[in-house]
Amino acid sequence: SSRRLANQRFAHRTASLLLDVRSDHEYQGEIYLLEPPKAGEKAGHIPGAVNIDYGLAHNEDGTLKSADELQKIYGNLISCDREIIPYCAIGARSAHTWFILKYLLGCDRVKNYDGSWNEWSRLNDVSIER
């Protein structure tokens, strides 16, 4: 099932780093898909995920920061020898971060969780942290 696959691929993989690239407000569970959560909506983040807002990779004019600046933002993240799995709300911001990590910073072991929070938060038997 989708739920089982999500649990196996993300929650129980200690060799992987889950990278939540949403805003701090989304990560903390204050916002769910651009507004406060309504009844029945689950807000927060996948347990163990690290939060680095994807917007930090941009200059004020919307262009990407230099490789040196990006290296400082992601720090030791790309130098570790483990798989990195970025996610966001619906997969767009995480795809952006996937591109940066893979093609601009040379991280070979990066995979985008395209279902992202929209999928994870709708599964019944998964953990959510706030």
Image: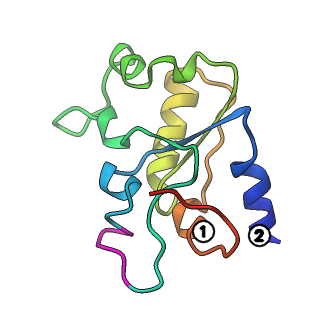
Residue 113 in percent (x, y) is at: 62, 52
Mark 2 or 1 closer to N-term?
Answer: 2
Task: Considering the whole magenta stretch, tell me its main secondary structure.
Answer: loop
Taking the magenta stretch, the answer to whether it contains residue 33 is yes
Residue 105 in percent (x, y) is at: 51, 21
Kindly indicate the quadrant of the structure image that contains residue 121: bottom right
Q: Residues within 10 Å of mark 1 (few under 14, many from 20)?
A: some
Residue found 48% across the figure and 39% down from its top: 97
Cα distance, mark 2 to mark 1? 9 Å
Q: Nearer the viewer, residue 30 or 77?
A: 30
Q: Residue furthest left?
A: 60
Name the residue carrying label 2: 2
Callout 2 touching callout 1 (CB < 8 Å): yes
Kindly indicate the quadrant of the structure image that contains residue 14: top right
Query: With respect to residue 19, does 26 lie above or below?
Result: below
Residue 18 in percent (x, y) is at: 59, 42
- Disc 1, SS: helix
- Disc 2, SS: helix
- Left or right: residue 113 versus residue 65 is right
- Left or right: residue 37 versus residue 85 is left
Three-letter amino acid code at the position of disc 1: Glu
Residue 85 in percent (x, y) is at: 62, 42
Three-letter amino acid code at the position of disc 2: Ser
Q: Residues within 10 Å of mark 2 (few under 14, many from 20)?
A: few
Name the residue carrying label 1: 119
Residue range corresponding to the magenta coloring: 32-38
Taking the magenta stretch, the answer to whether it contains residue 124 is no
